[in-house]
Image (spheres, coloured by chain):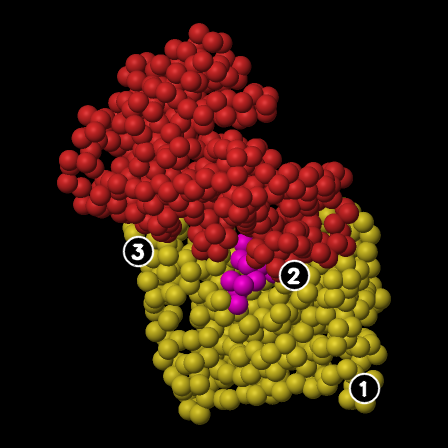
Chain colours: A yellow, B red
Amino acid sequence: MPGEAGSIDFPRSFGYLFILRFSLIPREGRARAGVLETDRGEIKTPVFMPVGTQGAVKAVEPRELEEIGAQIILGNTYHLYLRPGTEIAEKAGGLHSFIGWDRPILTDSGGFQVFSLSSLRGISEEGVEFRSHLDGSLHLFTPEKVIDFQRSLGSDIMMVLDECTPFPCDERYALESHLLTLRWAERGRNQKEKTRPLYGRSQLLFGIVQGSTYGQIREQSAQALVGLDFDGYAIGGLSVGEPVDVMYSITELCTDILPSDKLRYLMGVGTPENILESIERGVDMFDCVLPTRNGRNATLFTRNGKLNMRNASHADDFSPVDSECECYTCRNFTRSYLRHLFRAGEIMALQLASLHNLSFYVWLTREARDAILDDSFAMWKKEQLSRLSTEITEPI
Amino acid sequence: MPGEAGSIDFPRSFGYLFILRFSLIPREGRARAGVLETDRGEIKTPVFMPVGTQGAVKAVEPRELEEIGAQIILGNTYHLYLRPGTEIAEKAGGLHSFIGWDRPILTDSGGFQVFSLSSLRGISEEGVEFRSHLDGSLHLFTPEKVIDFQRSLGSDIMMVLDECTPFPCDERYALESHLLTLRWAERGRNQKEKTRPLYGRSQLLFGIVQGSTYGQIREQSAQALVGLDFDGYAIGGLSVGEPVDVMYSITELCTDILPSDKLRYLMGVGTPENILESIERGVDMFDCVLPTRNGRNATLFTRNGKLNMRNASHADDFSPVDSECECYTCRNFTRSYLRHLFRAGEIMALQLASLHNLSFYVWLTREARDAILDDSFAMWKKEQLSRLSTEITEPI
């Protein structure tokens, strides 16, 4: 029932405004700065979403995420469906209320996790059957069900169920998989139109472009999804092992097709370099576990590259992790202290490192936005890439 | 050189003011409310010190400690001497600067840890030789050295080296041990008088009463230490397995002897009940790992007793951990969410639980103080003890 959404009398309008301001100088290329209006406030793009898989960004409090300027976080339908379960989320009044986060949340559909984490039982036209990685229990995810689950969670941006192909993936499989994902996307969109939000706030739905590394399939996927008129479009199935130049060229191919007035989200990407290259290719939205996972492993991002905080060279280095960073960690603690915390196995090491790394990622996308609005993105990006390769401390 | 400290021209006066206001109503007994002035601000007693053994209170940021009203934290000379080492602490400008905490710090001498954690090689008149629990390296702690180490750390309150006897302990050993601890105490005090603070702020030194569960030895120990005129007095060697009524009677025996114008610190104690009973017996200062350790094990303290946050009864309980608590955890999150975080193995569980438990302990001692000043301690304490036994959720 495409096109009928507007005729349903929802508590609040489903409408949203995605204002895009393109750079005025032609050499700036595809990089975009936009604003997405949601019922929980606006999201200025490009934006990085901290990952809160199980309803918590690992080791970083919600108030700290606000402090560093995180505008939206990501939750995962697969994990939250299994634990605490959608019933608890509903009783809590939705995910925002449950986890104490008032700003927007995007929920992944769970497709990726079904294929990567669970014990897969079978994939069919109907959906995907799997055993929980927690207790082995049997579950079926269908395109309709994952919309219902995300209704229960009340996320501001929902994702359709998709099949995320591995790398490498033969072309025949990639084609069949894309076609299935496309049929699922339509069913998801229809389910969204048949149902309504549970908590009085509108929810957007994004389609997901698949097609592995095959340009023609990606084109078909993107074009067909655009025909289904989603609220935004994700590029999935990248950053799964393919060469980085392939990732960039597929990304560019997709953004060339996707409508300029809709948000583009590159799923699961990536390093600071990946993010800058993808912004240049017209991507607006990112999520990645790198800042938090690397933080917990003592790898800290700085404007001048990565540091291994366990390195002996930091033992008596009383400078901050990144002297230009304004996060709590960098304003109050030294490399020497962080090294001590990691060596001593203190939880505080994970907290301070994760907070800093997320702060760095949020800063990076915010600065990219400023540069785009300032018509200086290309120059700024070149300078950042140069700096990012400066300081690489090898592990001891 | 007792009595000569005042003749040395230190950067700032070594003097301090310990204002005690006793309850005016005789039935209030020994409970005291005081103010200890230090070069890093005043400490209002009774006071609970969060434990930051290795230079970090586990899972709770310094700014959060300030937020909940922690006035002073504890660090451990044994741990900090081994890692990061006193050289790093000195290069950092002292422990406060190293760990980003501006309020007072008390450092334990390391005596307790040498006996409990390390591989003890031998105890002699000179001091105690041990192997590090980290790398097996050989070290000697003498009464003089532990003062020097605490000079390097720059703690506001230093502790003398003592031998903490185990429970049970035969009387002969307890007597000999107390006499050795006493000789060490005098050597520590002399070392303090011969040296000076490294960072321009005065440091207090506390003696430690030992003597196991033997009243006569405890009396001797307390009286002899008073003769050495310390800045304050700790009661050590309790809460090591003896019956709780023995702990209380030994505590009372000690506070009866210790001078009323000096601070009394009951080391390593204890449960909320222990703390209330000890305040009633004239103790001013406490430290204990219970709030943080229990927090990490999903046991949360409330005004109505302890909760096991893993219990299934919390699954759909959307009330705060403690509805009367004003900490970040209780203002923003539910029992249901905390249970989810613990089950999901999220670091956030440790953070929110530790923050709440410390907040509860700080609240408890602050309220005790208010009740003392209000001449209502006995009644208040009775009410608290009654409430503390209300809500005990059994593990599932």
In the displayed structure image, the side of residue A383 where residue A108 appears, left or right: right
Helix, strand, or loop for circle 2?
helix
Q: Residue at x 53, y 14 (%)?
A: B168
User: Which stretch did the figure color magenta?
Assistant: A52-66
Residue B270: % across, % down: 55, 34
Residue A35: name its quadrant: bottom right
Which quarter shows the N terminus of chain B?
Answer: top left
Dividing the picture into quadrants, the one containing residue A284 is bottom right
Q: Nearer the viewer, residue A114 or B234?
A: B234
* N-term mark: 1 or 3: 1
Residue tagged 1: A9
Tag 1 or tag 2, which sits nearer the N-term? 1
Q: Which residue is mark 2?
A: A99
In front of the other: B278 or A191: B278
Q: Is residue A294 magenta?
A: no
Mark-to-mark CA distance, 1 and 3: 58 Å
